[in-house]
Every structure is written in C-alpha cells, then in structure tokens.
Amino acid sequence: MNNAGNRFLAGLLLAGITITASAEKEIRFSGSAESLDSGKIVYTEQHRQTGECRNGFWAPREHQVTYRDPEGDIIAQKTLDYGDTPSRPSFTLEDQRFGERMQVRNPENGRVRIRYRASSGDESSYRIKAPDNGVIDAGFEVMVRQNWETLVEDGEDVRIQFLVPTRGKFYAFDAEPAQMKALDGEHVFRISVAGWVSSWFVDPLHLAFNDKRQLTDFHGLTNILRNPEDNHRAHIRYEHENTPGCH
C-alpha cells in the first residue's frame, strides 16, 4: 500500500442546497483516538462548532478543533469556515510538532486555492476549480445528513468528488451503507475511492452515526501525523455534549 496515497483521507461534505435557516447555535463534542496498530489512545480531539439548522439538518458555520497528546499537550489545531458553501469549507490545519501546515481557501468564485508545507519543509501550491459535487475536508457529517434518505432508507450509494489537497485534485469517492462490528453507531457508512485503478493504494474510511445523525465513530486514516512521514490510523470514538435539535 502506498503511504502517500493513504494520507488522502480525512473528511467530506456534499453540495449546499436552498435553505431555511434558524438562529445560530453552538455545539461541542470530543473524540478519543485509539491506534489501530497499538490499541493505545494516541490523541484526543476537542470540537466547537457554531452553525444553524437548515431544512432540518445541522449546518456548521465555523469549527475549531484542538488536538492533544495523551499527556494533554496541544499537538495540532484546525479551523474551518464553511461560509455559504458547506460542501467546501475553507480550512487551516497546523501540526505544532512537525511543522506541517495545510491551508485551503474556497472563495465564492469556486477557484480553490491550496498551500501546503510538508514536515520536511517542502512547499507546494495549487489553484483548481471545484466541481458541483465537490467535497472538502471535514464535511462528511453534513454529507451523510443531507443524503440520509438515500444512504439509510434507500440503501444506495452517493458519489462525490473529494479534494486531496496534497495532490491539488478532486477524486471520485463513493459513500455507501456498510457494516463494522467494532463501531458503536446504529448506522455505518464506508467512504472509498471509486474505481479499481486508484483503489489499490487507498484504504476505505468507515463512519458511524446514531439515530440523531451525530457522528459516533471514525475508523481509518486520520489527518494527524504519527511521525514526520506517516499519519495515525485510528478508531476515534466521539461523545457529544449537546445536540442542535434540528429535527
């Protein structure tokens, strides 16, 4: 398996829709990442989202994530701005241990700007056009919620174009209902690269949600470095302090 190819996966979101919005709310949740290799807790996540209910779905507006090691020290931080295109949020992720930094900006004109600094210090930049079904980073939660009927009630797949920012390109991915006993949520979905040509070097992600459409589990390659070259593979279990009450 190609390690660079594996570092693709870390989030998703489907296209925005005509909306009926409610007052802005705030939700908080946390995650605990257990290594798939060692079985030990390797880091935790603290999430704070502000957003609103749109057509019965929770739509985040701003999102802050703090990552800490088992000793409680901050190892990375991430900020997201979903703007008016929740499928394609702008975001910045910076690892404070190894110097890796990813910045993605999605202005209104749909020309996505990417700047990436690897842990080695090498830098790259791209400017690409986002497809209509384009997905950037941590939008997989909204993607699932907006396609709940298709995925859960109809049991059908959803095709998206997911941005791989280190390569400056959108790739076709499929989201589909699945099963995995290790996950706690009532509804499990697999996110995988579409087509046999590229699927050999990318492991699928598995996500689980409860009946309130909240993310309960993430299983697969994370966006947090294990060392300067490799990302953690982990099972992240989430606990929610509150719910937005959108339905």
Image (spheres, helix red, strand yellow):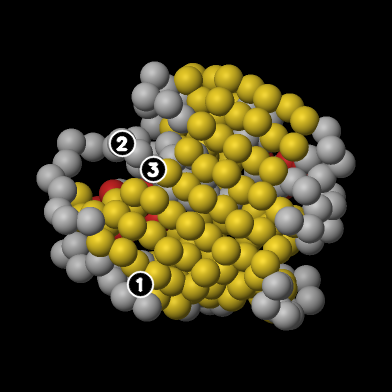
Q: Quadrant of residue 170?
A: top right
| Image position of 60 with respect to 39: above or below | above
| Residue at the image point whose x is 48% and y is 38% from the top | 90
Q: Which mark is residue 132?
A: none
Report crowding for label 3: few under 14, some 14 to 19, many 20 or more residues within 10 A (C-alpha): many
Q: Nearer the viewer, residue 149 or 90?
A: 90
Q: Please, what secondary structure does the residue beneath circle 3 have?
A: loop
Q: Which residue is mark 2?
A: 84
Residue 185 picture quarter: bottom left
SS at badge 1? loop
The residue depicted at 17 percent of the width and 41 percent of the height is: 19
Residue occupied by mark 3? 82
Q: Secondary structure at mark 2?
A: loop
Query: What is the crowding at mark 2: few (fewer than 14 residues within 10 Å), some, or many (at least 20)?
Result: few
Q: Is residue 103 left or right of residue 209?
A: right
* Labels 3 and 1: the sequence-earlier one: 3
Q: Is residue 103 left or right of residue 82?
A: right
Q: Is residue 126 left or right of residue 229?
A: left
**Which residue carries the number 1 mark?**
210
Location of residue 186 with respect to 60 vertically, above or below = below
Distance of mark 3 from mark 1, alpha carbons?
23 Å
- Residue 38, by quadrant, is bottom right
Q: Nearer the viewer, residue 176 or 68?
A: 68
Three-letter amino acid code of the residue under disc 3: Tyr
**Amino acid at the residue labelled 1:** Asn
**In the image, what residue occupies the spot 39% across and 19% down?**
109
Which x, y percent locates residue 128?
Answer: 55, 20
